[in-house]
Image (cartoon, rainbow, N blue to C red):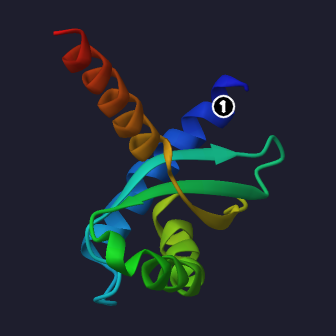
Amino acid sequence: MSKKIERIASILQKEISYILANEIKDKNIEFVTVTAVKVTNDLSYAKVYVTILNQDKKEQIMKALKKASGFIRTELADKLEIRHIPELNFVYDESIEYGNRIENIIDNLHNQEN
């Protein structure tokens, strides 16, 4: 991935986080953290990886994010000087859960040794 693409992904991550925290009025989209953004080389699509604090409402929050993606793109167009704002695809980031499971397995193995 080129430096330009990485820089744009970083800027998108920062700005989307700000928009979700401060400008979205939807109460379903609370306590959502943007963990990463991956942009295609032609800047037409961006995968926005998110984690959600309230796991009980995960499906509802993901639907709300998909619904709000047009508003978020509009806000990004106002804030950024990019010719074309990529289409946003919100994806639940399972890497933190995966890391927690691995950590629990290691702790259990360690406790069994003692």
Which residue is at 49% across, 40% downward? Answer: 10
**Is residue 77 something that shows in the picture?**
yes
Whether residue 92 is situated above or below residue 98 in the rendered picture: below
Circle 1 Cα neighbour tier, 10 Å, few/some/many (<14 / 14–19 / ≥20): few
Q: Position of residue 69 (x, y in %)?
A: 57, 78
Q: Position of residue 23 (x, y in %)?
A: 31, 78
Whether residue 93 is situated above or below residue 3 in the rendered picture: below
Q: Nearer the viewer, residue 73 or 20?
A: 20
Q: Position of residue 82 (x, y in %)?
A: 64, 55
Whether residue 26 is situated above or below residue 21 in the rendered picture: below
Q: Nearer the viewer, residue 70 or 31?
A: 31
Q: Quadrant of the N terminus?
A: top right
Q: Amino acid at mark 1?
A: Lys
Whether residue 102 is situated above or below residue 43 in the rendered picture: above
**Residue extending furthest toward the right:** 42
**Residue extending furthest toward the left:** 114
Which residue is at 28% across, 71% downward? Answer: 54
Left or right relative to 106: residue 91:
right
Q: Position of residue 5 (x, y in %)?
A: 67, 36
**Residue extending furthest toward the top:** 113
Which residue is at 41% across, 30% downward? Answer: 102
Judged from the image, the secondary structure of the residue bearing numbered disc 1 is helix
Residue 88 quadrant: bottom right
Q: How many marks?
A: 1
**Is residue 82 something that shows in the picture?**
no
Left or right relative to 66: residue 24:
left
Residue 67 quadrant: bottom right
The residue where tag 1 is placed is: 4
Q: Nearer the viewer, residue 93 or 68?
A: 93
Residue 108 quadrant: top left
Q: Quadrant of the C terminus?
A: top left
Which residue is at 43% across, 80% downward? Answer: 61
